[in-house]
């Protein structure tokens, strides 16, 4: 039976002690926790690794910050991309977010909150980018025109391939796609998602419910079309 550990329990106690202990104690604790991590599932291991790296970053270990970036770069970029629908801008947003993270990480008291905290920073950066883009009238008109052209429906052809599940997901609003990504890809709780998006937990639940219902209806429509 896999060993289950909570960073709020024994491991959390060791981490808290490590912040005020000497380097020899800290290194011994880290070696011990890495061994324990081998018996955790993937999600638990990532969470524990994150907390350890945050601790090491706060102790001034530059290599630990590089590993933290390696661990969370892709999830943060994917989140920015879902918000902006712009891959290149999302890389820029993510890099700006890492600059903010590096500057403020020492103020993060609870290491376990790093995932939600970093996603919130990316969300704010993405919202700033979107507001700036909206102010650029020429850019907005160009994007709108491109969008309209891409939405022109082509005459249905007999034998055309039915939409894939991912294509059905793409028919949801950006907000709905972000919610589904945070919940089912990143495995954030309702409370964490609320903090990331700056909305109440009840609002998250309601929006998530409506997003799931839309997917259900899209799947039903696809099944109906297949039977015709």
Image (cartoon, rainbow, N blue to C red):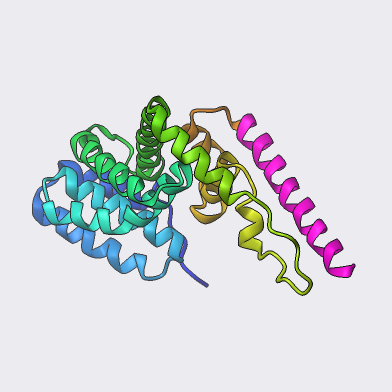
Residue in front for this viewpoint, 23 or 168: 168
Residue in front for this viewpoint, 138 or 74: 138
Position of 43 relative to 203 (above/below): below
Residue in front for this viewpoint, 75 or 215: 215
Magenta range is 202-228
Q: Magenta stretch: dominant SS?
A: helix
Examine the rendering and report whether any part of residue 105 can be seen. Answer: yes
Q: Which residue is drawn at 35% across and 41% down?
A: 118
Position of 208 relative to 14 (above/below): above
In-image side of 190 versus 63 (left or right): right
Residue 179 in picture, x, y percent from top left: 56, 43
In-image side of 220 versus 84 (left or right): right
Residue 135 in picture, x, y percent from top left: 39, 25
In-image side of 109 versus 78 (left or right): left
Give yes or no for residue 218 being in the magenta stretch. yes
**Quadrant in the picture for residue 25:** bottom left
Residue 149 in picture, x, y percent from top left: 57, 48
**Quadrant in the picture for residue 210:** top right
Examine the rendering and report whether any part of residue 179 can be seen. Answer: no
In-image side of 218 versus 168 (left or right): right
Position of 144 relative to 166 (above/below): above
């Amino acid at each position: 039976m896999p060993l289950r550990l909570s960073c709020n329990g024994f491991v959390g106690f060791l981490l808290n002690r490590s912040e005020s202990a000497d380097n020899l104690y800290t290194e011994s604790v880290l070696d011990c926790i890495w061994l324990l991590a081998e018996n955790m599932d993937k999600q638990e291991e990532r969470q524990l690794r994150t907390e350890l790296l945050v601790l090491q970053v706060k102790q001034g270990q530059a290599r630990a910050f590089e590993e933290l970036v390696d661990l969370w770069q892709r999830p943060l970029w994917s989140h920015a991309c879902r918000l902006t629908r712009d891959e290149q801008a999302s890389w820029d947003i993510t890099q700006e977010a890492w600059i903010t993270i590096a500057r403020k990480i020492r103020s993060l008291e609870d290491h376990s909150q790093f995932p939600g905290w970093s996603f919130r920073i990316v969300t704010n950066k993405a919202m700033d980018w979107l507001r700036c883009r909206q102010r650029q009238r020429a850019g907005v008109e160009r994007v709108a025109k491109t969008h309209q052209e891409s939405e022109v429906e082509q005459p249905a052809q007999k034998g055309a391939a039915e939409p894939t599940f991912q294509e059905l997901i793409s028919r949801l609003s950006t907000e709905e796609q972000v919610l589904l990504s945070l919940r089912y890809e990143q495995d954030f709780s309702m409370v964490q998602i609320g903090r990331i998006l700056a909305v109440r937990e009840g609002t998250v639940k309601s929006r998530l419910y409506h997003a799931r219902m839309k997917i259900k209806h899209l799947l039903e429509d696809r099944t109906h079309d297949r039977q015709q």
